[in-house]
Image (cartoon, helix red, strand yellow):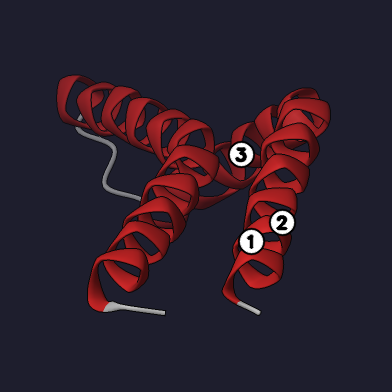
Amino acid sequence: MNTSEVIVIGRDLLMTGLLLSLPAVLVSLIVGGTISIFQTVTSIQEQTLTFAPRIMAVALILMLTLPWILKVATAFVQRMFLHMLNAV
């Protein structure tokens, strides 16, 4: 295994990780921003108000995207096994 193959594997790993975490992070950002704007407009400064809706939204989006997440993760593992077979 040479340096270019290691770079390709590392890049694939990072891109897959970013792709898999994107739905949860994006929903958390949108819900958190919406609640922050709501708190600013209504002058409610409760610190715990942002956590419950954010956790519920992230849990919901993870349940909805779980089949896609498993498909992408399975494809990544298959690619890594192919790299291992080609390296031997």
Report the quarter where the C terminus lies: bottom right
Question: Could you tell me how far apart the alpha carbons at marks 3 and 2 are, in whole angstroms?
Answer: 25 Å
Marking on residue 58: 3
Q: Which residue is mark 2?
A: 77
Quarter of image, res 29: top left
Quarter of image, res 61: top right
Q: Is residue 81 above or below residue 88?
A: above
Front in this rendered view, residue 4 or 30? 4
**In screen coordinates, is 34 left or right of 80?**
left
Which residue is painted at 25% across and 66% down in the image? 4
- Residue 37 screen position, x and y as percent: 21, 24
Secondary structure type for disc 1 = helix
- Amino acid at dot 1: Met
Secondary structure type for disc 2 = helix
Q: Marks 3 and 2: which is nearer the front? A: 2
Q: Is residue 5 above or below residue 24?
A: below
Crowdedness of circle 2 by 10 Å Cα count: few (<14), some, many (20+)?
Answer: few
Crowdedness of circle 1 by 10 Å Cα count: few (<14), some, many (20+)?
Answer: some
**In screen coordinates, is 14 left or right of 33?**
right
- The tag earlier along the polypeptide, 3 or 2, is 3
Front in this rendered view, residue 42 or 77? 77
**Proximity of marks 2 and 1: CB atoms separated by less than 8 Å:** yes
Q: Which residue is mark 1?
A: 80
Marking on residue 48: none
Q: Is residue 43 above or below residue 34?
A: below
Crowdedness of circle 3 by 10 Å Cα count: few (<14), some, many (20+)?
Answer: some
- Residue 20 screen position, x and y as percent: 54, 42
- Residue 19 visible in this rendered orientation of the protein: yes
- Amino acid at dot 3: Val
Report the quarter where the N terminus lies: bottom left
